[in-house]
Image: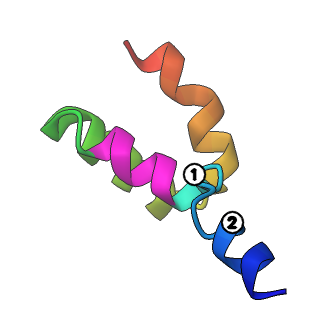
Amino acid sequence: MAELVAANSNVRQAPTVAERLIAAAAASPEVHDWIARQIKAGRKPSEILVLLPTLH
């Protein structure tokens, strides 16, 4: 069992929605501000991620 846990500890999980939003916000101050406005407007994080490619 310990071997299985050790083997799985090297596996990187897919980034969460939050991690993906944080990475996108780090791209530029404009993107950061746009994401912040979307959150304040009540958009779901998953919706924001869908809209990100259309931002540019």
Disc 2 residue crowd, few under 14, some 14–19, many 20+, Cα 10 Å: few
**Furthest-right residue in this view:** 1
Q: Secondary structure at mark 1?
A: loop
Quarter that holds the N terminus? bottom right
The residue to which callout 2 is attached is: 7
Residue 32 appears anywhere in the view: yes
Residue drawn at x 58%, y 28% is 51
- As drawn, the label of residue 32 is none
What range is drawn magenta here? 19-25
Quarter that holds the C terminus? top left
Q: Nearer the viewer, residue 38 or 53?
A: 53
The residue to which callout 1 is attached is: 15
Residue drawn at x 79%, y 74% is 4
Name the side, left or right, on which 31 lies relative to 15: left
Q: Is residue 38 above or below residue 9?
A: above
Foreground label between 1 and 2: 2
Residue 52: image location, x then y, percent: 50, 28
Q: Is residue 56 above or below residue 24?
A: above
The overriding secondary structure of the stretch rendered in magenta is: helix
Residue 18: image location, x then y, percent: 52, 60
